[in-house]
Amino acid sequence: MSSEVILDIRELRAYYRILKGDVKALDGVTFQVRRGEILGIAGESGCGKSTLAHTLMLRKPPLTHISGEAIFLGKDIMQMPNSEFRKMRFRDISIIPQYALDALSPTKRIGTFIRDIVNEHDITADEEFMDKVKERFAMVNLDSSVLHRFPIELSGGMKQRAIMIISTLMNPALVLADEITSALDVSSQRFAASMLMELRDKGIIGSAIFITHDLSILYQIADRIMIMYAGHLVEIGPVDEIIHNPRHPYTQALIASLPKVGVQIKHERLEGIKGTPPELLDIGPGCRFRFRCPYRTNKCEKTPEIEDINPLHSIACWHFEELGGESVG
């Protein structure tokens, strides 16, 4: 993994503007993605993971960019005209969406869908190009006959694999994988995750952001993990540190909710996280996890800044020095 930064997110805010007000789904997030790395982003539903992906790629109303920068390959894509950003999509930055069927056109065969996409980028889908498509399909165990089928003729796993290949045909520098394993069975989940690593290792993609609620998958493929809660970044660091020595109370609670290898449920029950995430419509300052945190004090009424535990591990918690982290591996 290179030390070169290809994506630099700085105090990024994106809200859902609805009649009742602004839902602060992404509220001042700062982090970087390096060339060649897989950055995992985890957290409960509603923490802002998918909102981050949509902010970088789509920004369809009611989602609105409020402030902050996203410097990708030296350009702030938040300020980029749609016409210019459209040229970068799929070619430089791409997304593998959560629901493959929604991404494919139900009225077009897979091959026609691919030709339409690449034609938008002035690429001719000639015989040589389609031979490359067939080679990529073979990587994910898809026969070339899939090109002649409609999406409805494919299983859920086949559609997800097809979209994974289509989204990376132009060898993008960065891929956003948005909950791509959530609707798959266990074997398909493992295949999709390992396939993303293979695409990175073969140089087909440069880097990836892998968004999921499943930390066990990230432990297998990620270089670093970023934990989000209620629109805030709460902890980010190397995968082994986050999994085996989590420092934020929320990260510790997430890890404690995972089953441990070799431990039967009759010997050790899993712990859920008490309470529910806060309403983000009119939320004020303060640590957003304080409503569920067992270590809450008056100090938590003020929003904590991100601090470095070490050069690679950062956290937003007033009490991380007191907690000291716990080994849970």
Image (cartoon, grey):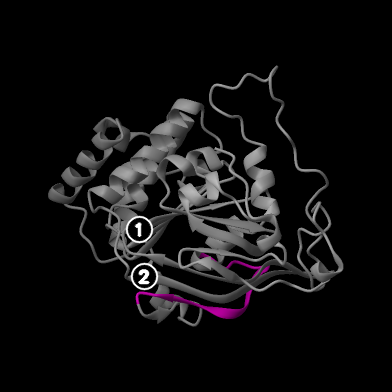
In three-dimensional space, the C-alpha distance between marks 2 and 1, rounded to whole angstroms, equals 9 Å
Q: Which residues are magenta?
A: 58-73
**Residue lying at 50% horizontally and 27% vertically, measured from the top left:** 186
Dot 2 or dot 1: first in sequence order is 2
Tag 1, which secondary structure?
strand
Answer left or right for 15 relative to 99. right
Question: Eyeballing the image, is 39 above or below 101?
Answer: below
* Amino acid of disc 2: Ile
Q: Nearer the viewer, residue 85 or 188?
A: 188
- Residue 150 seen in the current view: no
Task: Say which residue label 2 marks.
Answer: 6
Question: Eyeballing the image, is 280 above or below 164?
Answer: below
Residue 57 is situated, as x and y percent measured from the top left of the image, at 49, 65
The numbered mark at residue 207 is 1
Q: Are marks 2 and 1 in contact (CB under 8 Å)?
A: yes
Dot 2 crowding, Cα within 10 Å, few <14, some 14–19, many 20+: many
Residue 14 is situated, as x and y percent measured from the top left of the image, at 64, 71
Quarter of the view holding residue 5: bottom left
